[in-house]
Amino acid sequence: MTIATTKSTHPATQRLTIHFRVSLIAFALLALIVPLISPSGTVVMMASAIGIASLVSIGLVVLTGVGGMTSFGQAALMGIGAYTTAVLCLKFGWSPWLCLPAAILATGAASAAIGLFTIRLSGHFLPLGTIAWALSLYYLFGASEFLGGYGGLSGIPAPWIGSYSLEDPRMFYPVIWLIVAVVVVLTLNLFDSRVGRIIRSLRAGRTAVESFGANTQQLKLFVFVYAGVLAGTAGWLMAMFTRSVSASPFGLNAGIEYLLMAVIGGAGNVFGAIFGAGLVVVLRNYLQDLLPFLSPAAGNATIIVFGAILVLLLMKMPQGVWGAVVRRMPFRTVKSHPDIADVGLERQPMPPAGADLLRVKGLERRYGGLIAVNNVDFTIRAGAITGLIGPNGAGKSTTFNLTTGHVRPTAGKVFFLGGDVTGITPREVAGKRVARSFQHVKLVPDMNVLDNVAVGAHLRSRKGVCSGMLRLDRHEEARIRAEAMAALQRVGLADKAWVETGTLALGQMRIVEIARALCMDPVLLLLDEPAAGLRHHEKRALLTLLRELAAGGMTILIVEHDMGFVMELTDHLVVLNFGVRIADGTPAEVRSNPAVLAAYLGGGE
Ligand SMILES: Nc1ncnc2c1ncn2[C@@H]1O[C@H](COP(=O)(O)OP(=O)(O)OP(=O)(O)O)[C@@H](O)[C@H]1O
C-alpha cells in the first residue's frame, strides 16, 4: 500500500543535537553553580525549592500527563515523606540518610493503599477523589499530637557526609539537584521502554491496552506509586532542607500548585516539569517581593496577579511553556531514530489449515429487554477469511466483543481450538494470540506510529520496569522495533514509522491498527471495518495483504460494510440480522440467499 507522506516529527523519537546537548548541559551547570557562588542566600533557597518542587512535578508528568490521572493530592503524599523523616529522626534517632529509604517506602506503601481505590475512579470522580484524601491527610498531619499539631516538628538534624555537615543550604543544594538528575534519567529511560510504551498507551483506553495483554489496573497503580515515591522523596528533601516539618506546605493549595507546575511546563514532558516548577517558584517569589515594593495595596493582590499570569500562560501555550521555549531557541532539535535490530521477535507456528479455530454455540447477549445477539452459532476454520455482515445494529460488533472477552455472553459458549473460553478476559484472549482492530480507532495520537505498533508486541517481550530504567533492555527493544517496522512494511506504512500518529488520515490509522495487531503474531485476526475511509487503491492493497496473511496460515474474521470488498475477499460469510444468524455459507451462497436479499442486500443483487 502506498499512502501520501505527512509531517514527520515527534518528541519521543527526537534526540537532541550535539549543539543543543552541549548548550543544555552548559546551561544546567551554570544554573547549578550560580546559586552556590551567589552572595545572596535567596538564590540558593529558591533554586533548592525549584529542585524539590521539580520532583513532585515530574511525578505529575508521569501520573497526569502520560498516565492520564489528574491528582491534586501530591503535596499530601509529600507530607508523608516529610513526616516519616521527621518522626524517625526526632523520635527514634534514625540517621537522616536512613530516613530517605524509609520515606520512600512509607510513601510507596501509602500511595499503593490510596491508589488501589483511587485508580478505580474515572472522569471527574478521580480528581475529586484525590482532593478528598489530600484534605484528609492534611487534617491528619495538623490534628495529630504525635506529629506536633499544626506547629509541626522541628530540630531535625542535618545530614552529613563524613565529618562535613550539610547544614548550610549551599552544601545541601547539590544533593537536591543530584537526586533530580537521577530521577530525570530514570524517568526518561522508563518512557523509552516496553513498560513505558504501554503506560503511554493508557490514553488509547483500557479496551485497547488490555487487548494486547497488558493489565491496566496494575499499570495505573505502578504509575500512581511512582509519582507518590517522587513526592515522598521531595518530602525527605524538604524535611532535610528546612529541618522542620509542619502541615501547611502539604495542603490542597500546594497540591494545586504542583499540578499547575506540571501543566504549565508541558504536562507530558519531564523537562517541562522542571521548567514549570522554576517558573511558578520564581514568579511567586518575585511577585511577593515586587508588588508590595510598588505599592502596599498591590501587595494584597499578589495571589490574584500570580493566578492571572498563570491563566494567561495556559491560554497562550496550552501545550506548555517548555515546548514553546524550545521551539523558539536558535538551535533546533533534529530527529535521529533509535536502534532497530536486523531480526524481529520469535514467531510461533500457526494451527493446521482447516482446524476448528473458533466455534460459537448458542451465543446470546441481552441488554435489558434488547437481545443484541440471539442464539448465534458459527465456526471459523484455521486459515480461512470469514466475513461477519449484516445491517446496522445487527449485532456484529457485539459478536466481535463476545469473542474477544470485551463483553460477557448472557448465554452460549465460545470454544477456541477446542477449549472452552467463554467469558475469559480480553487479556486472556490476547494470550491465545487473538488480535483485533477497532471500529473506533484506539491509538495514541501524540505517540509515533512505530511506538503505537510496537504495543502489539507487548506479550512477546519480557523486560520489566527495572531493566527499562537501567537501560538493560536495549537488545529486546531493538528487536521489538524491528518487529513493528516489519509489520509496518507489510501494511505499506513503513515511511510513516516516525510520524506522529494523530497526523494520519483515519483510513491510515485503521491500517496502523492492523500493523499493531500483526505485531502480536496472531493466530486469529479480527478486523472491525478495516476498509472504512480507504481510497480505492488502498482497499485493493488491503485486500492483497489480507489474502497474503491468510495464505501464510493466519485466520481472519472481518466485519465490513463494503459488500464488494467482502464478497471478493472472504471464503465464508455469516450474516446477522436483529442479532439472529440468518445465513452462513460461501459468498456465492449468501449472495443468492432470499433471507439475506430481503434483509440486507435489499433484493438488488
Ligand atoms: N452496551 C450496550 N448497551 C445497550 N445496547 C447495546 C450495547 N451495545 C450494543 N447495543 C445494541 O445492540 C444492538 C447491536 O449493536 P452492534 O453494535 O453489535 O451492531 P452492529 O451490527 O455492529 O452495528 P453497526 O454496523 O452499526 O456497527 C444495537 O441495537 C445496539 O444499540
Image: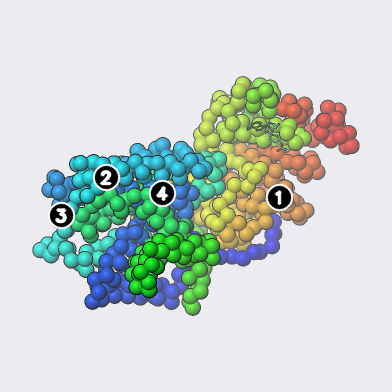
Whether ligand 1 has any atom under 8 Å from the Cβ at mark 3 is answered as no
- Which residue is identified by label 4? 72
What residue type is disc 3 on? Gly
- Residue 311 appears at what percent x and percent y? 49, 61
Counting residues from the start of the chain, the first of labels 3 and 1 encountered is 3
- Which residue is identified by label 1? 542
Counting residues from the start of the chain, the first of labels 4 and 2 encountered is 4
Spatial separation of the CA atoms under disc 3 and disc 4: 29 Å
Name the quadrant where ligand 1 sits.
top right
Question: Are the two marked residues, 1 and 2, in contact with CB atoms closer than 8 angstroms?
Answer: no
Question: Are the two marked residues, 3 and 2, in contact with CB atoms closer than 8 angstroms?
Answer: no
**Which residue is more in the foreground, 266 or 280?**
280
Counting residues from the start of the chain, the first of labels 1 and 2 encountered is 2
What residue type is disc 2 on? Gly
Extreme residue toward the front, this view: 297
- Residue 347 appears at what percent x and percent y? 53, 45
**Which residue is more in the foreground, 372 or 195?**
372
Question: Are the two marked residues, 4 and 1, in contact with CB atoms closer than 8 angstroms?
Answer: no
Quadrant where the image shows the C terminus: top right
- Which residue is identified by label 3? 155
Whether residue 540 is visible, yes or no, is yes
Question: Tag 2's secondary structure?
Answer: helix
Counting residues from the start of the chain, the first of labels 3 and 4 encountered is 4
Say which mark, if any, is on residue 142. 2
What residue type is disc 4 on? Phe
Is 522 located above or below residue 315 in the figure?
above
Whether residue 187 is visible, yes or no, is no
Spatial separation of the CA atoms under disc 3 and disc 2: 18 Å
